[in-house]
Amino acid sequence: MNSKPRRRMASTIGLLLLCLSRPGAGRDFQEDAGPGRIRIESALVTVPAIVRDGEGRFLTGLPPESFRLFEDGNPVPVSLFLTSEDPVKIGLLLDTSRSATTVRKKIKKAAERFLVQVRPRDMVMVAGFDSEMRELCPFSSDPRELKDAIRRARSGGAYTRMRDAVHELVRHRLRAATGRKAIVLLSDGQDQGSRVPAGGLLDAVASSNTLVYTIFYTVDPQELMRELFGVATRRQSGAAEWREREKQAAAYLEKLSDLSAGRFYSGGAGDFDRIFRQISEELRAQYLLGFYPEGKGIDGATHSLVVGVDVPGAIVRSRRSYRSAPGGP
């Protein structure tokens, strides 16, 4: 094969990667979210939990006495117990960066249909992020207001400050919210320009009581090049670097969800409706337990958490640890 088209393709993919990258790539800016400075959200440690039977069906309506909560292997008294009957606050976070250009319309349509599944007593906040996070609608239960906010989502910058946006919701917008809460994030996961380092966001999510549901989608670099620059290319070398970045981004999003006891989803734009439906069903089945740690619970160390139920064959997915520090939240 002639090497000239191959060099042209590699240059084209390189241009795309450059345009969607930030200055100083590979250098993270540090802030106060380091591992040694974690604060739990309050003295009350909350533990989201999802219970399924052996066939994968949600078990709802279980009474408080069915649950057992363990900290570092020791039983602790449950001071808070909420069920699916209690409202949930949802932060709907949409990637509006240039890398989402080819799927943005489908994202917005699916997000609108997701709102139909949200119950009237639940509250949803809509935000978009690229070079900055923009709150498109504060917490609301008005479907028309929320749909209008989704339709207004527009790209406003060249960067993708995803970590900053998630951190803002976890540590500020949702921190003071009581009860059940969750973030639903749609993104290709390729962060460019965030001030919050990758490890800092993981720590913030691990120390919060907010479920994080991540929906990862892939982007065709050739299609994106045509959309952004009107350049048609053939698939050649250079695409491998793009796919490796996507693989790393997906792994990071999966880790975010796992730390929070949320779930990671991966699929194309045609899968969004199904994924949103699954998230909605799971949120309706979520329990929230809480306890007040004593003594060693406020010592800056990481403590294990286990939730058990007295239903034979039941499978529980829950927050597995928490970390706190002396001096309060």
Image: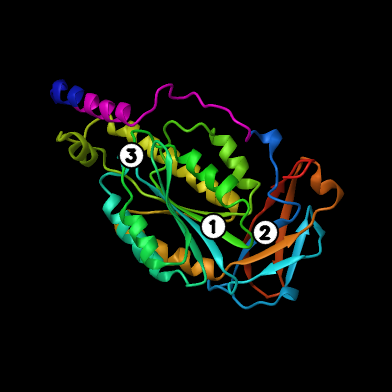
Q: Nearer the viewer, mark 2 or mark 3?
A: 3
Instruction: Bin the neighbour count of mark 3 within 10 Å (Cα to Cα): few under 14, some 14-19, many 20 and up.
Output: some
Q: Which quarter of the picture shows residue 226?
A: top left
Q: Position of residue 147 (x, y in %)?
A: 35, 61
Amino acid found under the numbered disc labelled 1:
Ala
Tag 2: Cα neighbours inside 10 Å, few (<14), some, or many (≥20)?
many
Looking at the figure, which quarter contains the N terminus? top left
Q: Amino acid at mark 3?
A: Gly
Do the residues bearing badges 2 and 1 touch, measured as CB atoms within 8 Å?
no
At x 36%, y 59%, the residue is 111
Going 64% across and 72% down the picture, which residue do you hit? 313
Residue 204, image quadrant = top right
State the image coordinates of residue 44 (x, y, percent, origin top left): 74, 56
Residue corresponding to mark 3: 156
Q: Are marks 2 and 3 in contact (CB under 8 Å)?
A: no
Looking at the rendering, the stretch of residues picked out in magenta corresponds to: 9-33
Label 3: element kind: loop
Q: Nearer the viewer, mark 1 or mark 3?
A: 3
Question: What secondary structure is found at the residue carrying circle 1?
Answer: strand
Do residues under tags 1 and 3 come within 8 Å of each other at their CB atoms? no
Q: CA distance from mark 2 to mark 3?
A: 36 Å
Tell me the CA gap for discs 2 and 1.
13 Å
Q: Which residue is mark 1?
A: 182
Secondary structure beneath dot 2 equals strand
**x and y percentages locating residue 149 in the rendered image:** 36, 56
Give how far apart the Cα atoms at labels 1 and 3 are: 25 Å
What amino acid is found at the position of numbered circle 2 in the picture? Answer: Val
What residue is shown at x 54% (from left), y 61% (from top)? 89
Left or right for 292, reference 91? right
Please tell me whether residue 17 belongs to the stretch shown in magenta. yes
